[in-house]
Image: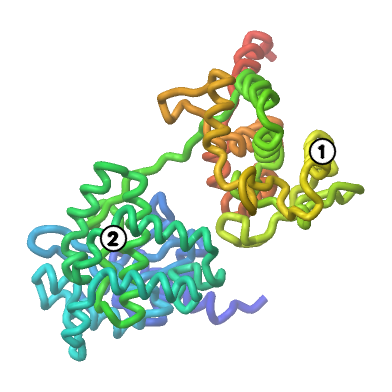
């Protein structure tokens, strides 16, 4: 079988990529990305590897073998501190453009110069652009689908839920700085982030993504030149995210029995809603928005078809087979008789139109009745723990991880995440394991 030209090119340059630097060319940048993605070169624990450009001091190429991306970055020391700014993906930013940006960054050593280096044709009006004006334009263009950040460009316009998230996050963390210019805001970012991080670490992490999108939009719209000051969040970056460990709280059989008994004493609306989540393994948002048009209650093909718009990430729709779950099918059949025929929602709002939108009061009431409420937020069961409990029970029952991933409605690339989050040994399974130890005999 003849060796392809592409494989020959990779083989010829493989020795060049063994070191920490090489002279960049457009072709070599793309070939080294192919080599890393193929697994032929050693990477760090996150699947990444970086090289310096022998032709331009300060220019770095980083390839992520897991995501298949390759990006240019400016890495240097300014005023005694390490600075790293992403310049863009190699498919979007040419090598010439990356070297030009690094050249301007290297020769303007002021803080403002590093954050927003002057371009030859840059107008003074761009330097005075207010943050609030940019955010308003970004939200309008994002909502209309005229501008989409990062990988969202592959998925189409955002949902109303996504837009509400951005608007609420902006009001909670950034709106008070709308009067600043972009340069002033960029210079103040470390201080703003440190204050927010001390108050609400997880919200601060989410804000980094918002700020990254704001500057990404400003770059695309021509309001900002140079690197994105919120793009890098590594150990040497200006904004270092707080590590977030996946929550692994699951309900034991005893806790579930107490919870089930407490739900039975509550209104059928909430009992059925929470039961649907744990049996179908779907998020509470999707359960709240369930429509009768998407549910088939009879026959061997009885199922709940969840549209892509109700799935996290919107990678595609999902189908929950109901024929094999007679208990859940019975609950939904009973609900169909309770809900008005002209109501499209499985769980209509108690007051007003639409579906249920909040379940916190009912959940707290049920937890109190089951004596499961705790002042410790990590120990206190949450509605999302129902989904995790159902997934962990599947894993404990020996269902393969790829099948559990499919049942959850996640993409197959999420198997690793499912293993960390859902492969949790419940107390009962652990007790059985300990009980089995003395029974083992020597061969």
Under tag 2, what secondary structure?
helix
Determine if residue 21 is in view: no
Q: Nearer the viewer, residue 129 or 323?
A: 129
Instruction: Say left or right for 222 vs 438.
Output: left
Under tag 1, what secondary structure?
helix
Circle 1: is it few (<14), some (14-19), or many (20+) Cα within 10 Å? few
Determine if residue 187 is in view: yes
Q: Nearer the viewer, residue 295 or 43?
A: 295
The quadrant holding residue 327 is top right
Query: Which residue is labeled 1 in the image?
Result: 334
Instruction: Say left or right for 215 vs 249.
Output: left
Query: Which residue is labeled 2 in the image?
Result: 175
Mark 2 vs 1: CB contact within 8 A: no
Residue 414: % across, % down: 57, 51
Q: In the image, what residue occupies the spot 42% across and 30% down?
A: 377
Q: Residue furthest front?
A: 352
Circle 2: is it few (<14), some (14-19), or many (20+) Cα within 10 Å? some
Residue 160: % across, % down: 53, 63
Q: Residue furthest bottom?
A: 121
Instruction: Return the mark for residue 284.
Output: none
Q: In the image, what residue occupies the spot 37% across and 59% down?
A: 209
User: Alpha-carbon distance for marks 2 and 1?
Assistant: 47 Å
Q: Is residue 271 above or below residue 85?
A: above
Q: Is residue 172 above or below residue 264?
A: below
Closer to the N terminus: mark 2 or mark 1?
Answer: 2
The quadrant holding residue 84 is bottom left
Q: Residue furthest right?
A: 299
For the image, the number of numbered tags is 2
């Amino acid at each position: 079988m003849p060796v392809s030209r592409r494989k020959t090119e990779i083989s010829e340059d493989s020795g060049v990529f063994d070191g920490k630097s090489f002279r960049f060319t457009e072709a070599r940048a793309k070939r080294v990305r192919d080599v890393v993605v193929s697994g032929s070169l050693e990477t760090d624990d996150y699947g990444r590897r970086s090289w310096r450009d022998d032709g331009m001091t300060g220019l770095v190429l980083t390839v992520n073998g897991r995501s298949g991306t390759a990006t240019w970055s400016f890495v240097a020391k300014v005023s005694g501190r390490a600075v790293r700014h992403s310049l863009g993906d190699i498919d979007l930013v040419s090598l010439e453009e990356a070297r030009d940006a690094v050249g301007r960054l290297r020769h303007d050593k002021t803080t403002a110069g590093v954050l927003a280096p002057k371009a030859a044709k840059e107008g003074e009006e761009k330097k005075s652009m207010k943050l609030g004006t940019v955010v308003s334009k970004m939200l309008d263009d994002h909502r209309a689908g005229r501008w989409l950040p990062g990988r969202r460009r592959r998925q189409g316009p955002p949902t109303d839920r996504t837009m509400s998230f951005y608007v609420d996050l902006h009001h909670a963390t950034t709106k008070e700085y709308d009067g600043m210019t972009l340069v002033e805001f960029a210079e103040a970012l470390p201080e703003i982030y440190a204050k927010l991080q001390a108050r609400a670490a997880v919200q601060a992490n989410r804000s980094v993504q918002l700020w990254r999108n704001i500057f990404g939009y400003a770059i695309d719209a021509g309001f900002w030149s140079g690197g994105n000051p919120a793009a890098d969040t590594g150990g040497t970056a200006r904004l270092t995210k707080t590590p977030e460990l996946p929550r692994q709280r699951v309900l034991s059989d005893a806790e579930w029995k107490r919870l089930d008994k407490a739900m039975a004493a509550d209104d059928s609306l909430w009992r059925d809603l929470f039961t649907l989540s744990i049996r179908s393994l779907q998020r509470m948002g999707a359960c709240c928005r369930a429509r009768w048009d998407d549910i088939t209650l009879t026959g061997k093909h009885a199922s709940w078809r969840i549209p892509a718009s109700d799935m996290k990430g919107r990678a595609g729709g999902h189908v929950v087979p109901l024929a094999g779950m007679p208990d859940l099918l019975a609950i939904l059949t009973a609900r169909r008789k309770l809900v008005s025929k002209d109501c499209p929602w499985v769980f209509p709002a108690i007051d007003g139109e639409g579906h249920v939108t909040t379940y916190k009061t009912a959940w707290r009431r049920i937890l109190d009745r089951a004596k499961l409420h705790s002042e410790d937020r990590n120990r206190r069961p949450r509605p999302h723990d129902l989904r995790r409990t159902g997934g962990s029970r599947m894993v404990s029952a020996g269902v393969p991880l790829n099948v559990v991933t499919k049942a959850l409605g996640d993409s197959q690339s999420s198997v690793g995440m499912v293993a960390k989050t859902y492969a949790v040994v419940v107390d009962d399974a652990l007790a059985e394991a300990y009980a089995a130890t003395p029974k083992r005999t020597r061969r």
